[in-house]
Each structure stands twice: as structure tokens, then as C-alpha cells.
Image (cartoon, rainbow, N blue to C red):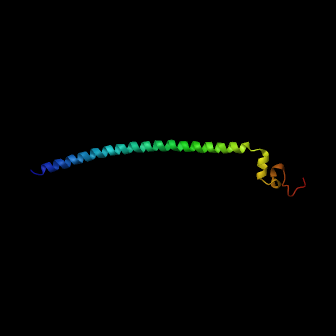
Amino acid sequence: MPYTPTLALIALGLVLLVLIGVRVIRSLRRFASTRTLVGDRFGDGVGLLKARSAALKVAIAGRRTSGQARTRANPAYDRRRGADRRTSNA
């Protein structure tokens, strides 16, 4: 029976292939969970950075004096004082 050693080597090769495949799949699962964790933490950090940037913009806008705020808009069209100054006599 000269084919017995060949069959034994093929069976051993298949067993080793299955064992290696199981280890690779486990490693890929661990890598995927780690990748998800890192992505979540990175996303949280980006969100916090955006929130801090928005808060800083609000704080800077709040520090402007009323004179600086008026220079940006045309006072003739200022409707907050009750009327359009172009058409009223007040």
C-alpha cells in the first residue's frame, strides 16, 4: 500500500490548514474589535474638538463691543430700532 503515506500527509496538511485558519480568524476578530474601539475613541475626540471650537467662536463673538458689531451692518437698514430709517422721518 504505497498510497498510505500520501494520504497521511494530506490529512496532516488539512488538519494544520484548519488550525492555522482558526487562529487567523481569531486574530482578525480581535483586530476588528480593536479597530472599532480606536475608531470610536477617535470620533469622540473629534467631536469634542469641534464642540470646543464652536464654544471658542461663541466666546469671541460675545467679546465684541456693540460698536464693533454695528460697523459690520448698515445702520440705515437696522430694523431692531423699530423702523427702516430709509423711509421714516425719525
Coordinates of residue 69 in the picture (x, y in percent): 76, 48
**Label tally:** 0
Residue found 62% across the figure and 42% down from its top: 52
Coordinates of residue 44 in the picture (x, y in percent): 54, 42
Coordinates of residue 11 in the picture (x, y in percent): 20, 47
47 relative position to 65: left or right: left
Residue found 26% across the figure and 47% down from its top: 17
Within the image, what quadrant is residue 62 found in? top right
Residue found 46% across the figure and 41% down from its top: 37
Q: Nearer the viewer, residue 20 or 61?
A: 61
Coordinates of residue 31 in the picture (x, y in percent): 40, 44
Vertical placement of residue 34 versus 71, above or below: above
Residue at the far left: name it. 1
Q: Nearer the viewer, residue 31 or 64?
A: 64
Residue at the far right: name it. 89
Residue found 84% across the figure and 53% down from its top: 83
